Image (tube, rainbow, N blue to C red):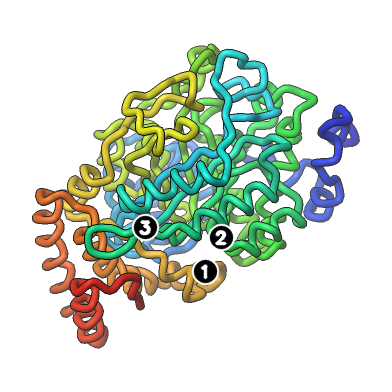
Amino acid sequence: MENLFTYPKEISGVIRKEEIMRYLDKDGGFINEEEIKEKLSQNINPSPSRIREILRKSLSIQTLDPDETASLLNVKDRDLWEEIFATATRVKKIVYDKRIVTFAPLYCSSYCINNCLYCAFRRENTLVKRRKLSLEEIKREAEVLAGEIGHKRLIVVYGEHPTTDADYIAETIRTIYEVKVRTKNGYGSIRRVNVNAAPMSIEDLKKLKEVGIGTFQVFQETYHQETYKKVHPENTIKSNYLWRLYCMHRALEAGIDDVGIGVLFGLYDWRFEVMGLLYHSRELERKFGIGPHTISFPRIEPAFNTPFVQKTNYRVSDGDFKKLIAVIRLSVPYTGMIITAREPKKIRQEMIKIGCTQTDASTKIGIGAYSDRYNQQEAERQQFILGDTRSLDEVVREFAQMGYITSFCTAGYRCGRTGKCIMELLKRGKEAKFCKLNAILTFREWLDDFASDETKEVGEKLITQEMEEVKEQIPSAYPKLLEYYQRISNGERDLYF
């Protein structure tokens, strides 16, 4: 194992061996590749009765075991898959009701010392345009996102580089939270700053905790070690599989309540990767009593001057993409599931119906793209090419037409409904009730401050339906909801249960 910790001098101090070894139960970590392959081979051709038994367990909001997930992944019968899709939809409704959470990505830097074969920002790509935002530039980006578009949540993204270390990340979070912009009827601000960044030490993660980080998100990219080694060249920080694998252990130990895991689908067999996500979720539950707050499943996309993307042998079809999302929803039923603007409109519509709970909109991933105000994608400024660049207003209107209310709520995080607390509420189907109330209030706020007339008309019809449901389903909360609703209509902001 010693070779895992041998690096050139300039990066050798980043990885802390003791912050890997302290979590290891056995050599190689909690991802046992032979066991995963064995589970997949042992559960071929599961009977319909076996699958229906597993579906009943998912409906009780229990994490599946590896044999159960492997059985779902091995279903061949088309009609049985339709039952799986329908059950995934039911599980999502139990845990999250008819809510969709929206956010925007904010890329702060394209500098990176790693050399990942699939990424336009890799070190050896000399043709990409590099840039790091100053704090003043980050403020301007946040002002556009909060004051003109209406976002309340961001996922802030950083490459791995000495100039974007934990101190820089902490300062950017602090800067974003300080932004407050006048709108048509109130004010706009970012109330939840999630972070997608490189794995860090416990010491650095505590710095992010202190400034109010939301979810800390790191994707393993692939759980298959041979593939991981192939796409993450030696003598880079990212080549250390175990440093990345145990980053969520360190985050939770550092006091960060919510963590997000994910896989870049298209690097290796999608069934193996779904099993890896399950094993990771169960490991966090076992060691910390908290599973992942979110799971992400981006598919590999074209990227500027990045030929590897066209060479992969594991590209995931739309049909298999739908299957893997349904199986993740059933296997880890409490988790939030993020589908992003990598995907085109029609795919996002369909996947939200069967399990996804969060998505981005008005998305720009060029460095400084929101305040620079360019409308076309510029491949040489981006990590990859987006599939859907529609405005937040368009996306919100579409969701309302589909019967989904867009929630801009961040109340739970500020009321302490995080970590173990929110996990218990989600598993018992209780969090959906809080969120339904707060979704109505934040949706009213957003409609008044940002919506076009067309979106406002559709949105208000949906609010009427949601209010009636509250009156029937949560009658004790209805009077207070009416009071808060009227106060928000009169110009107050950020009222919540």
Mark 3 surroundings: few (<14), some (14-19) or many (≥20) residues within 10 A: some
Closer mark to the observer between disc 2 and disc 3: 3
Mark 2 vs 3: CB contact within 8 A: no
> Residue 356: where, in percent of width, then height?
36, 48
> Residue 196: where, in percent of width, then height?
56, 45
Q: Name the residue type under label 3.
A: Val
Q: Quadrant of the N terminus?
A: top right
Look at mark 2 in the image and give the residue it sits on: 258
Is residue 366 visible in this depiction of the protein? Answer: yes
Question: Looking at the image, which is closer to me, 181 or 463?
Answer: 181
Mark 2 surroundings: few (<14), some (14-19) or many (≥20) residues within 10 A: many
> Residue 357: where, in percent of width, then height?
36, 52
Q: Name the residue type under label 2.
A: Asp
Which residue occupies 11% across, 54% down? 458
Closer mark to the observer between disc 3 and disc 1: 3
Q: If you read the primary sequence from the N terminus, does the residue marked by circle 2 or circle 1 appear first?
A: 2
Mark 3 vs 1: CB contact within 8 A: no
Q: Secondary structure at mark 3?
A: strand
Vertical relation: 230 (above or below) 64: above
Look at mark 3 in the image and give the residue it sits on: 181
Which residue occupies 33% across, 75% down? 495
Mark 2 vs 1: CB contact within 8 A: yes
Vertical relation: 302 (above or below) 364: above
Mark 1 surroundings: few (<14), some (14-19) or many (≥20) residues within 10 A: many
Which residue occupies 54% across, 41% down? 157
CA–CA distance in space, label 2 to label 3: 28 Å
Look at mark 1 in the image and give the residue it sits on: 418
Q: If you read the primary sequence from the N terminus, does the residue marked by circle 3 or circle 1 appear first?
A: 3
